Image (cartoon, helix red, strand yellow):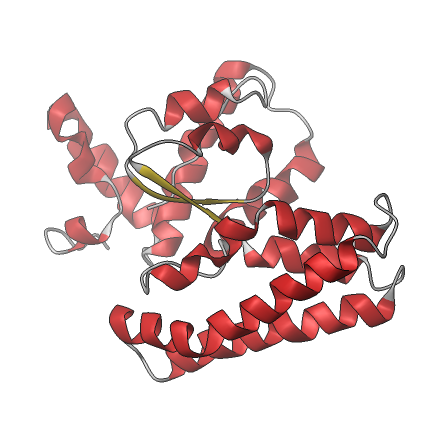
Amino acid sequence: MVCFDYQASRGREGPVAFLNHFKGALQTDGYTAYDSFAGHKDITLLACMAHARRYFEQALDNDEPRATHVLQLIQGLYAIERQAKTESLSAEERHNLRQEKAVPLLEELHQWLKDNLGEVLPKSAIGKAIAYSLKLWPRLTRYTENGQWAIDNNGVENSIRPVALGRKNYLFAGSHQAAQQAAMMYSFLGTCKMNRIEPFGWLREVLRKIPDTRLSELHRLLPIKDNLKKTNPQ
């Protein structure tokens, strides 16, 4: 499911409060607020290869030979992911494929990054791209340890794209309460889209049932796969 959480600021207090009871794998960009979970015994941090790749794409005008070399290596990593998807590999098979093919590529890339870090200006686009990847390297490569983990968090990126587009149009939510209500609607619509549910039909079903639904049973009205078996709103 998709869940948007509104916070009044970009401080680390928001993620810490929202993920207070979370256990599992947490895949994010390099936003420093998530560093708070680095030593958490129940949370495994993963970084996003797509974000790392984006830095090198932005560095093409600054240092095309270096940026192109890294992009080609990253392209090889994504080719492995496409192979796993095309062949419909299980999580275990995907893990084995990554260990065989992705790990050597990542080791080559890691050595190249370390060798070139001192050869570029730290504040240049290519320097920032290399530093970003090296800083997050353990998290960037951790996806190879589990076949259920993704190489990037593009699924999240696709879900937040409507927010980014809408923000350019309406600029302001109006108030904190309005922003929280918007987050609820984005969550509902995003979850419908992820589960391929026509949102207005499901919303009519929710409005019909909600007066007779207990607070402890509200989760049954969420547009998620477990609930699709119980009802089929038109």
Give x and y (percent) for residue 100.
41, 78
What is the x, y in percent for residue 153? Answer: 49, 53
Asked whether, in this view, residue 175 is left or right of residue 208, the answer is right
Rendered image quadrant of residue 31: top right
Q: Where the C terminus falls, by quadrant?
A: bottom left
Q: Position of residue 8 (x, y in %)?
A: 55, 17
Q: Is residue 73 left or right of residue 90?
A: right
Compared with 104, 3 (above or below) is: above
Q: Is residue 179 above or below residue 157?
A: above
Which residue sits at x=16%, y=25%?
A: 211
Q: Is residue 153 left or right of residue 219?
A: right
Instruction: Residue at 43% x, 31% y: name it.
Output: 37
Q: In this view, which residue lies farthest toward the bottom? A: 87
Looking at the image, which is closer to me, 79 or 203? Answer: 79
The front one of 175 and 70 is 70
Return the x and y of residue 140 as percentages of the image width and height.
52, 54
